[in-house]
């Protein structure tokens, strides 16, 4: 059921007021800013052949949470890079020992329960640059109007290049009824999703930011970025994340039933340039599902 027309007009006016006058000329995330180095030590870069594909979040000393749709390549070809601020700089790189997709994951074009847990082939030693982010307490999805933030190495403009330096962007949670309106996502947003908007029409996450954590309460992961429109800054197709809180029982069960590693392999120190033969600059392969193909 769509909200009454008067309520829709009010919501649109509020969005327009938030976006009017925003700086649309900045070209980070899109429209973001450089993160303070290692201020988000839980950030993970999922890479293939040294090229960034998706984001992720370290939840445990040997587990990473990301978007399931990012895992289109054989895991033998993928690496998880931790402690990273600038793409291409030396950092710890782990192979993926085990991949666990959510049992009810539906790939595009439906894209539901878009979560995957990746087990590292070694145990991370917590430090100032590498530190897990806690799961949310309780199972309630974050409320409309909540202020959140997102970080990633995704496209800085369309068409364009991946960000070299980790970018961050402030967001707010939108009313799910508005996001499900026929002018927006037309009923595609489930109660386990979070619809988001930035302060400016020229700001949005984009390809390469998928799988990254949405943080609404300091020290806890609230969501995992899942999809947006083909035009990342389309105000009628705002970015959507999977809410983590409803999935915490599944996450804890996976972590509990997959105990410590039988042996620990030392991590690689990555210093692999991203080859032009591989998709780094927002070419096909740098993941962010474009939800305009959803029915």
Image (cartoon, rainbow, N blue to C red):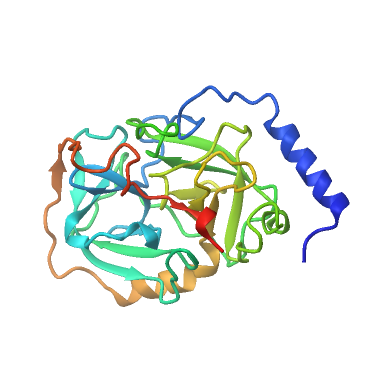
Nearest the eye: 174 or 235: 235
Return the x and y of residue 84 as percentages of the image width and height.
29, 38
Return the x and y of residue 211 as percentages of the image width and height.
41, 53
Looking at the image, residue 111 sits to the left or right of residue 17; the answer is left
Instruction: Pick the quarter of the image with the N terminus.
Output: bottom right
Q: Residue at x 40, y 58 (%)?
A: 67
Query: In this rendering, does residue 220 appear at all?
Result: no
Nearest the eye: 35 or 45: 45
Q: Residue at x 68, y 57 (%)?
A: 176
Return the x and y of residue 168 as percentages of the image width and height.
47, 35
Does 76 sit above or below residue 170? below
Q: Residue at x 22, y 58 (%)?
A: 123
Return the x and y of residue 277 as percentages of the image width and height.
18, 40
Query: In this rendering, does residue 7 appear at all?
Result: yes
Query: Exactly how many numbered labels are in the figure?
Result: 0
Instruction: Pick the quarter of the image with the C terminus.
Output: bottom right
Nearest the eye: 69 or 229: 229
Identify the image quadrant of residue 207: top left
Q: Residue at x 44, y 34 (%)?
A: 158
């Amino acid at each position: 059921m769509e909200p009454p027309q008067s309520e829709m007009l009010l919501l649109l006016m509020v969005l327009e007021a938030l976006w009017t006058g925003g700086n649309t000329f900045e070209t980070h995330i899109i429209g973001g800013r450089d993160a303070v180095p290692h201020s988000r030590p839980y950030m993970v870069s999922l890479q293939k052949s040294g090229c960034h594909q998706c984001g992720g979040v370290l939840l445990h000393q040997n587990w990473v949470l990301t978007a399931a749709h990012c895992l289109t390549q054989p895991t033998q070809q993928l690496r998880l890079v931790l402690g990273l601020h600038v793409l291409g700089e030396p950092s710890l790189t782990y192979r993926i020992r085990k991949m666990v997709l959510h049992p009810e994951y539906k790939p595009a074009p439906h894209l539901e329960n878009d979560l995957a847990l990746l087990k590292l082939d070694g145990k991370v030693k917590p430090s100032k640059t590498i530190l897990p982010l806690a799961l949310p307490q309780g199972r309630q999805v974050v409320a409309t109007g909540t202020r959140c933030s997102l970080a990633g190495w995704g496209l800085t403009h369309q068409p364009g290049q991946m960000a070299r330096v980790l970018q961050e962007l402030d967001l707010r949670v939108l009313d799910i009824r508005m996001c499900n309106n026929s002018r927006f996502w037309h009923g595609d947003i489930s109660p386990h999703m979070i619809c988001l908007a930035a302060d400016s029409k020229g700001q949005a996450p984009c390809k390469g930011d998928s799988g990254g954590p949405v943080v609404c309460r300091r020290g806890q992961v609230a969501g995992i970025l899942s999809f947006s429109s083909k035009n990342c800054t389309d105000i009628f197709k705002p970015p959507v994340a999977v809410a983590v809180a409803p999935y915490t029982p599944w996450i804890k069960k996976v972590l509990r039933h997959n105990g410590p590693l039988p042996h620990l392999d030392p991590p690689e120190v990555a210093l692999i340039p991203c080859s032009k033969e591989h998709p780094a600059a927002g070419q096909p392969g740098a993941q962010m599902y474009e939800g305009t193909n959803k029915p």
